[in-house]
Image (cartoon, helix red, strand yellow):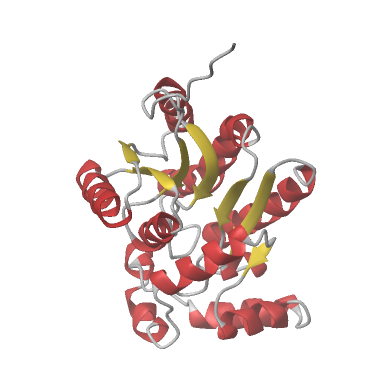
Amino acid sequence: MTVYFKKSMKEQKKVYAIITGASKGIGRSIATELAKKGFNLLLVARSAEELASLGHDLEIQYGIATDFLAIDLSIPTSPKVVSDWITDKNYGINALVNNAGYGQWGQFKDLDLQAQMEMCRLNMDTLVSLCHLLIPSLIKEKQSYILNISSTAAYQAVPTLAIYSATKAFVLSFSRALRFELKNTSISVTCLSPGPVDTGFAHRAGLDAFSKMAEKFNMQPDEVARIAIKGMLAKKSEIVPGLTNMVSVYANRFLPKAFIEKMAAGIYKV
């Protein structure tokens, strides 16, 4: 007679959702929303203290497992470090949330070139690298997800946010193509394109004057996260949270590009 023994919890391979930029803003809210759904979490951002605190709170509140890696994802070698960390820990991955990113405001010719290139690396290169490195793990699961965070700025050129809007247009286009390529696998790819969110983004980008106006249209990160995870689990291709943002994106399909760019330049003028 053959006897089968169930593996102990220590021997069983745990499966996690990994979130970049998890310590603040939308990333933190997405981590909380996934925890509510019972996902174990791998939290990645620069601040070890904030990640440790968040992981501890989510473990206590929702009874999940967490781990974290404090790392600067704008460094070209960082995605490989993240991938090796996951492999060394023997973690399975059933969701990848590429949330890390930031913007810079000002005339392209006046902004520091190195800072703009670092933004390109974080917003695009890191996202692409993590997708490529982690798809082999994601595809092993019965159902898995990639959620890439873009922006409503992806749907038009934005003078004075030229590089930021271009990087987000890349994320949107890449996500669409990747979704098609992976349609016959276990991986569903979703792209989230929020508008203004109360996360401190405008302040970091140097848009202090705009931030006062944005307060009228800001969504809260918890609301955006709730919409995002609901859409991701429903395997939606694109998510634009908020009626105002949806109308704006829809209008961009029909209005002349020159008109849209002139309006954007007026809103974000230096």
The residue lying at 41 percent from left, 82 percent from top is 214
Q: Quadrant of residue 205?
A: bottom left
**Residue 4 image position (x, y, % from top left):** 53, 19
| Quadrant, the N terminus | top right
Question: On the rendered structure, is 193 left or right of 177?
Answer: left
**Residue 102 image position (x, y, % from top left):** 43, 56
Outermost residue on the front side: it is 1
For residue 45, above or below residue 168:
above
**Residue 145 image position (x, y, % from top left):** 60, 48
State the count of labels: 0
Observer-nearest residue: 234 or 241? 234
For residue 267, above or below residue 226:
below
Q: Quadrant of residue 25?
A: bottom left
The residue lying at 58 percent from left, 85 percent from top is 243
The residue lying at 40 percent from left, 55 percent from top is 35
Question: On the rendered structure, is 163 left or right of 104?
Answer: right
Question: On the rendered structure, is 198 left or right of 225?
Answer: left
Observer-nearest residue: 60 or 121? 60
The residue lying at 60 percent from left, 72 percent from top is 240
| Quadrant, the C terminus | bottom left
For residue 210, above or below residue 67:
below
Outermost residue on the bottom side: it is 216
Observer-nearest residue: 45 or 228? 228
Question: On the rendered structure, is 37 left or right of 133?
Answer: left
Observer-nearest residue: 80 or 74? 80
Q: Quadrant of residue 132?
A: top right
**Residue 192 image position (x, y, % from top left):** 58, 63
